[in-house]
């Protein structure tokens, strides 16, 4: 996912499938990236991640089944700097 400031929130949606049981829990965590972020509901399959700053983040979703086994996957979020207008100079009059 890629966003550009001033947008500093992204929604991530994960899921889990257990062929021999049921998914009993979800856990989102940040693996890499700037220190500034907030995971709104880290124990839900879908959550907003707020207060992001420019940089590249990696977030991991870990799912746990009813027998305690886990699976995990990652998502990368890139936050680009705000696009500022260029300055034009047409030369001397």
Image (cartoon, rainbow, N blue to C red):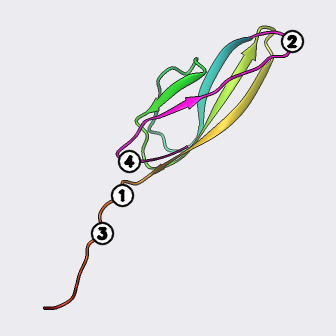
| Membership of 60 in magenta stretch | no
Is disc 2 surrounded by few (<14), some (14 to 19) or many (20+) residues within 10 Å?
few
Is disc 3 surrounded by few (<14), some (14 to 19) or many (20+) residues within 10 Å?
few
The residue that label 2 is drawn on is 20
The residue that label 1 is drawn on is 83
Q: Quadrant of residue 38?
A: top left
Residue 21 point in image, percent of width and height: 82, 9
Specify start and end residues of the magenta stretch as a single range.
1-22
The residue that label 4 is drawn on is 5
Quarter of the image with the C terminus in it = bottom left
Which residue is painted at 73% across and 29% down in the image?
72
Which residue is painted at 44% across and 38% down in the image?
36
Q: Is residue 84 left or right of residue 43?
A: left
Which residue is painted at 21% across and 88% down in the image?
91
- Cα distance, mark 2 to mark 3? 57 Å
Give whichever of discs 4 and 3 has the lower sequence position.
4
Q: Is residue 6 left or right of residue 64?
A: left
- Cα distance, mark 4 to mark 3? 17 Å
Report helix, strand or loop for mark 3: loop
Report helix, strand or loop for mark 1: loop
The residue that label 3 is drawn on is 86
- Cα distance, mark 1 to mark 2? 49 Å
- Give the vertical position of 34 relative to 84 (above or below): above
- Cα distance, mark 3 to mark 1? 9 Å
Report helix, strand or loop for mark 4: loop
Residue 47 point in image, percent of width and height: 52, 25
Q: Are marks 4 and 3 in contact (CB under 8 Å)?
A: no
Give whichever of discs 1 and 2 has the lower sequence position.
2
- Give the vertical position of 12 relative to 87 (above or below): above
């Amino acid at each position: 996912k890629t966003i550009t400031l001033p947008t500093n929130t992204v929604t991530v949606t994960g899921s889990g499938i257990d062929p021999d049981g049921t998914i009993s829990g979800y856990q989102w965590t940040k693996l890499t990236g700037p220190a500034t972020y907030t995971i709104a509901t880290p124990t839900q399959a879908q959550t907003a991640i707020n207060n992001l700053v420019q940089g590249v983040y990696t977030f991991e979703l870990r799912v746990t089944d009813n027998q305690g086994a886990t699976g995990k996957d990652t998502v990368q979020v890139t936050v680009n700097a705000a696009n500022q207008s260029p300055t034009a100079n047409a030369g001397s009059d």
